[in-house]
Amino acid sequence: MKQYVGRAFTHRLFWPVAMLVALLAINVIAVPGFLVITVNAQGHLFGSVIDIVRNGAPTLIIAVGMTLVIATRGIDLSVGSVCAIAGAVACSIILGSPNPDDPVVVGIAVLAAIGLSLLMGLWNGFLVAVLGIQPIIATLILMTAGRGIAMLITEGNILTVESAPFKFLGSGFLLGIPVATIIGAVIITVAALLTRRTALGLLIESVGINPEASRQAGVRARGLLFTVYAFCAVLAAIAGLILTSNQTAADANNTGLFIELDAILAVVLGGTSLNGGRYSLAGTLVGALVIQTLVTTVYTVGIPPIATMVFKAAVVTAVCLLQSETTTAAFARWRRRSVARKPVTEAVVSQ
Amino acid sequence: MKKTIGLFAAGALVLALSACGGAAPAGTGGGAKSLDQLVVGFAQVGAESGWRTANTKDIQAAFADAKIKLQFSDAQQKQENQIKAIRSYIQQKVDYIAFSPVVQTGWDAVLNEAKAANIPVVLTDRAVDSKDTSLYKTFLGSDFVLEGKKAGEWLLADAKGASAPVNVIQLEGTTGSAPAIDRATGFADAIKADTNIKVVASQTGDFTRAGGKQVAEALLKSHPEATVIYAHNDDMGLGAIEAIEAAGKVPGKDIKIITVDAVHDGMQALADGKINFIVECSPLLGKQLIEIITKLNAGETVPARIVTEEGTFTQEQAKAALPNRKY
């Protein structure tokens, strides 16, 4: 038993998970029925936890792409703008068609949005992999220009769409589970299988640790970078479509605003270093859940809106401090000391 | 020494000149121009909402009707763009400048330039925070406190004689923005009259539909005793409708909804019985803006604060008004 506790303390996911549990506990104290999930009249799962996994899905989806980009020692600031562009493209196609409720029209709109975003991702990849521009600068270009592109597509208006199939993406339910949550779950599972069941993840990490050494070892860094940025942009487009569908309108100015920061935060909370290399998709999942639970906690506990930012900053600072290397080392020392007092347990741990 | 005297002389000359300019009432020097000779520069915030687009269209239409030449610019929500636009209007020597300031502060320099060039300025929709009220002729816009008050008064009348306490969830606008602060203040003032009515939770939904939905989802669960939602704009109210329906309750019946704005989608929901009351915040400022400019042009004075003409809508009124709404 003891060795599991000890291991848990030094596991890099310990503090984010602890924070998640703590936040949930605060909510349960504030609202005793917080964790209760019921089935409502329409046969949908209903409860605060369901809200968290549904509203948190766009951030999670983008954070998955961001994790892989960050693993290559890159960063993608343009995801928020890509969200806006994807929403704008889809809504203008749906609005332009005579029959917005036709699933085929919605399908075309979704594919067009994803296709265009793929091009944007390839553009980011081109700037980073071929021209060798620093990722933060390369993606900053699309971050600023992207909202302008979205504005051009929407002609500066907010496009409100009334389309049942499109609304399904963001607010629909399938077998009682929110569609957005299902999409998020499928994406993180596919990403994990693709990168961890093959050598892909290892190659991405090697590029992040030392691009030149990996090239000499025969890793095609350029192709990998292209793939990773394109993948991230496609995920951003999917998240943007969910966001747009949820608010039933394409808003070039506000859709996905600052979501890049939330996604980066989710990745960092999950223990992936911005220096590239080792990454953890499970960590990213926990990070995204912490962020969304934090938002819900603010509402449930009734923190005044003017203090919201300070509260969020305090929680994030706490997690970052707790999982810093210095703190982890301190905990490891404390564990060694406590173990040293009982030599028997030490033998078990060392096995 | 000579230089200093020269500077003094130049300074005195400038003072004399500006005093001279100040003496002549703006726009009337050398006889009032006829309306169709006027050029008015309008610096719009952007096209960030349906409300704003309706505002732009109405102003453009009103100027076309009055046959006054309008120079229009869109600042895309950036103060620097708006300042640039106002500077270019000053250079073009337009007769009047009207604008909706993106933010409240930082306008003194450019407004002083306009004043020095003798161009009267009219603020529309939003105010500026400046001690020097001589920088603009008037501020035409909604009274957000009054809007909040109207919302509160409807609830007072509706909750009259209710035996059970009336618990209200408030969905605030963007934290720190003037409409969010004022609509909350006006509402709180109005409901003070009835101790039975209480705001049990108040959170920001950022004026967006998604924000309103997310906040309402959480607050309806943590405050199951709430029977009224007061949203600072229609969009958040529309988001709240979805949250209420997901919670298995009937919007407009189990949970009453009061909103502010009266944009098309909100009015539709009101007519459908999902919202109970909407306080109008009219974007149709064009007609009143033309009146102000006509008055100023004739050398008359205008009050420093002109409140937009706006009403309120119940469900029946919404059904009647909906076919003729411009936005």
Image (cartoon, coloured by chain):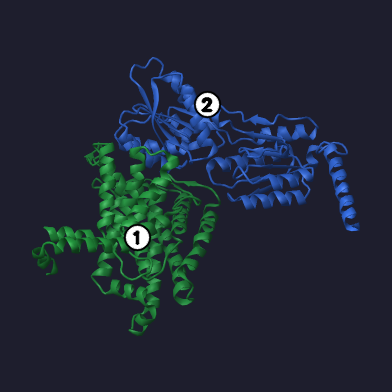
Chain colours: A green, B blue
Tell me which residue sits at (37%, 63%) in the image.
A66
Q: Quadrant of the N terminus of chain A?
A: bottom left
Residue B222 % position (x, y) = 31, 35
User: Is B73 situated left or right of A58 in this image?
Assistant: right
Q: Quadrant of residue B22?
A: top right
User: Is B21 situated left or right of B247 in this image?
Assistant: right
Looking at the picture, does residue B251 appear above or below residue A238?
above
Tell me which residue sits at (26%, 38%) in the image.
A29
Residue A122 % position (x, y) = 44, 69
Tell me which residue sits at (27%, 47%) in the image.
A22
Q: Which residue is mark 2?
A: B312
Chain letter for mark 1: A
Mark 1 residue element: helix
Question: Which amino acid, mark 2?
Answer: Thr
Residue A161 % position (x, y) = 44, 46
Q: Which residue is mark 1?
A: A267
Numbered-mark total: 2
Q: Is residue A271 visible?
A: no
In front of the other: A261 or A254: A261
- The residues tagged by marks 1 and 2 sit, at their Cα atoms, a distance apart of 48 Å
Question: Which amino acid, mark 1?
Answer: Val
Chain letter for mark 2: B
Whether tag 1 and tag 2 are in contact, CB under 8 A, the answer is no
